[in-house]
Image (cartoon, coloured by chain):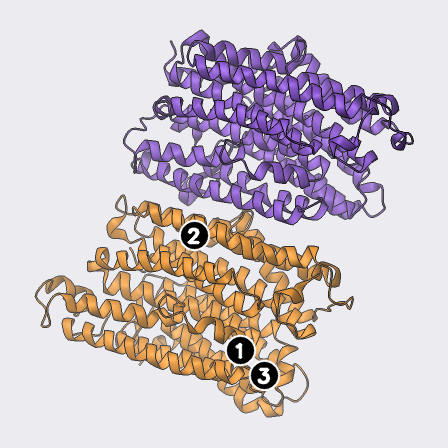
Chain colours: A purple, B orange
Amino acid sequence: MLTALILIPLVGAIAVVVLGRDARAPRVIATGAAVAELAVAAVVFAGYEGAGGYAVDVSWIGALDIAYLLRVDGLSAPLVLLNGILGLAAVLVSWNVELRAREYFAWLAVLQAAVMGVFVAQDLVLFFVFWELELVPMFLLISRWGTGRREYSAMKFLVYTLAGSAFMLAAILALYFSFPGSERTFDMAALAGRDMGSLLVPGSLVFSGFLVAFAVKLPVFPLHTWLPDAHTDAPTAVSVMLAGVLLKMGGYGLLRINAGLFPDQLRDAAPLLAALAALNVLYGAFIVLRQTDLKRMVAYSSVSHMGFVVLGLASTGAAPAALDGVGLSGAALQLFTHGTITGLLFVMVGLVYERTHTRHIPDMGGLARQVPLLALGFMIAGLASLGLPTTSGFVAELLVFMGTFSVYGLATALCAFGVVLAAGYILWAAQRVLFGPRLERWDHLPDARPVDLAAMAVLIVPIFVVGVYPRLITDAFEAGLAPILRGLGAA
Amino acid sequence: MSARDLYLVSPALSLAILATALVLAGPLLRRSGAVQAVALAGLSVPLALGVSLWAGLDGAEAAFGGALVSDGLSVFLGLLVTCASALVLLASFTHAERYRPYGGEFAGLLLFSAAGLTLLAGAADLLTIYVSLELASLPVAALAAFAKGRAGGVEAGVKYLLLSAVASAVLLYGFAFLYGATGTLRLIAPDGGPTIATAVVAGHGGFAYGGSAVLVGAALAAVGFGFKLSMVPAQMWTPDVYQGAPVPVGAFLAVASKGAAFAVVLRLFTVGLGPVEADWSVLFAVLAAITMTVGNLTALAQSNLKRLLGYSTIAHAGYMLMGVAAVAANSREAGDGSLGPTAVLFYLAGYAAMNLAAFFVALAVTERTGDETIAGLAGLAKRSPVLAAALAVSAIALTGLPPTVGFVGKLFLFNAAVNTGLLWLVVVGALNGVVSAYYYLNLVRVAYLREPVSPERIGVPRTLAVALGVCVCAVLVLGVWPSGLLALARTAAAALVP
């Protein structure tokens, strides 16, 4: 079942290349594969807890104890679902890509498979393989189908991630060789709970190796500068995937590995992480206020919102018993909700850009009259992003702040101010783009087509469902985070 | 000399016979491609003999009174050299046409060198090492100058010859120190007689020239071999020769020549100088870091494709030296000592596949367009989608990204290095991978994103396409399923670290 998660997109990619000879076939095949993938992801999400779950454990490189080990627990199941949702949305917004469509849809599917692999791999080396596998499709997608300084941005993205993963690889190997022969393993579950005090090198160094790799990906200030460039120049669907799931790989890694394997080191690093989190939130938010490019604006808002994840992690690391680790649940939920919300924001920006051919905010205005459906989607995404109750964004931020206030009051207050700024920049942007005087040059713009509505619906539904009934996702996360909390020392 | 002795060295012997036959019969084989066809058909003999030796492998077996040895390492490398030679000859089917009527010499010289390399991998004393090394080197000097009409062609040959001679002198000087200190030339003694290793153990600290004579000898030998490995400080010749020499010769140098050199370095140092390995492993660790960094940083600034590939081979020599530095003495647990040599041998085979693919793409493009610059690759995706795809696969593999053999190969090398406490070297190596990503993926970028300089399509000769296909498949298959090759490499490495 889990192997199917990885294979369906790959088979889809091959099918697109082989069968997608006429102009419309690639997108039809890609959509079929994405729907199938979402269905399997939903099944996995619904049934991972069953007896034995869906674990796969096959020796891959036996000589080095490297296994093809896949497992899904409460932490990864929602992210698997998220990847399924975003994958479908990404294909749907690419419906009008005509430039070398076969290759485009094939690479998009490979990207989805690689991300899926990251979320289900439980062997550190396999995790690393999928982590790096995602680079090539991203590099090609940005540099071939992007806009603006696309080649520069693609290379920057690649170099940043590779540099981060260089430290991760060293950390993985150091971790493996720290134990005597019979206890050596790359299995994350088996490594959890071991004493990380006396490793090959100090445990904090190994911890930092992972931290750097994940901080680049999340991204954490000051390692974030690749993100605005990559987002701005990437095609819409790739921005959706980048914001929706690729950043989540960083957050997932922080929770799974930094918190799961290194509770003591996390406790020591917590004050620093809390400070970085506040910096991330405020820095990102202030930069957003100055943006005139719609896509860059959303990109920096991602930087800002990912600060909440770090804040939740830091506070729970420092005081795991506080409110049953609700901060950590909030951080995990923020991964899911931000994936759908920012995914939707990028979809809307992409759809608007497709029609106006500009992302320059001052050039727009009054679009709510010409394209009401797009404007509606835009408003939903915006309001969810600023944390309006009944949307999922509200729940995640609320949980994070509940968990963190008693631990890092100042950092929480600063981050809460970030939410105020978010309300400011989102509403301001909406006002400038959607409302105001009607501009004649946009009169001819067509409103959303059925396929655009489908892409929007795929993302809007989870936003409201989780907003109204968050337990659907939080129950899974709480179950998945329970062992991590125990490791951190919660009662 | 017994029949058994002849059988044990038969791969090298058959290569030499085949080479002689090609040189003699070259003028008679007038039809185009005939020489290469005969050479390829003939290569099935050493290949079959190598496989049969591997199948009957039972520990180490000495031949010719201990001058040569047949063990996992020698047979593995012999097979690797034979396969690489076959692929190079296959790929240069049409290229070699321009050397008529000297096509026989071209193939013959290549195979003479291959015979020398095969012997080198099985050399069991210092003199045999030296003689095999010269047999392997001299034909290459002639081959490098084969395109003597081209600018840089003769320069490449002369440069290789002169610097090779200097390196040999340094190597011999080092051997003299080793002989003076230990009183023997032998690395392996089947009759239980004295070897360099036993002498080093017995006389530790009390040699005729003082205890440091062994280390001086080891350092000089490392520099001498460093020429073949393209190891800093003996790497200067590499880009010039790769640029001036015909592309197939560069490919042969990068893969076969480097492979055998690594085999002999592993044998001399881990077997002969094993007792003092903690001393020289530091040397190789530092040289590995410097070599890969120098190779990668200088590669960044290159605009000539062949030169770029030259610098890239320097960088990869640096990666493989990590495996040499990962010695048993420093390994975390007894029995882990073979990780380093295993990783080097695995990487050599994987590197052969990915690097040959890159060289073959360069061969196809330069052959058709005459343009050796990287800019000449512009629009390759439009002019020849097959070549562009092969270039992309090899570039991704050389960078060390999954799902290619380049990734697993590096993983094994890093693995071995961490096992022996060289975590810092792994960080250096991994960061070097980031630097290399820039220039390797730049090739992909130019091939796919730049507009072609001319709309003319680049046809690929069928023979070259087959060779390229074999390499690309190997890169991908070994990347996903490395266990088979890894098991072979382990068997071969068992000859060094039991």
**Figure quadrant of residue A439:** top right
**As rendered, which of A237 and B297 lies closer to the eye?**
B297
The x, y position of residue A352, in whole percent, is 79, 31
For the C terminus of chain A, the image quarter is: top left
- Image disc number at residue B150: 3
Question: Is disc 1 on the same chain as disc 3?
Answer: yes
Outermost residue on the right side: it is: A444
The residue tagged with tag 3: helix, strand or loop? loop
Q: Earlier in the sequence, mark 3 or mark 1?
A: 3
Q: CA distance from mark 2 to mark 1?
A: 38 Å
Q: Along the horizontal axis of the image, is B331 left or right of A126?
A: left
Callouts 3 and 1 close, C-beta under 8 Å: yes
Label 1 lies in what chain? B
Q: Earlier in the sequence, mark 2 or mark 1?
A: 1
- Image disc number at residue A426: none
Q: Amino acid at mark 1?
A: Gly
Residue A477 visible in the shown view? no
* Residue pointed to by mark 2: B487
The x, y position of residue A101, in whole percent, is 78, 45
Label 2 lies in what chain? B
Q: CA distance from mark 3 to mark 1?
A: 8 Å
- Image disc number at residue B244: 1
What's the residue at 69%, 62% (across, down)? B378
Q: CA distance from mark 3 to mark 2?
A: 44 Å
Q: Which of the two marks, 3 or 2, is nearer to us in this view?
A: 3
Q: Amino acid at mark 2?
A: Ala
The residue tagged with tag 2: helix, strand or loop? helix
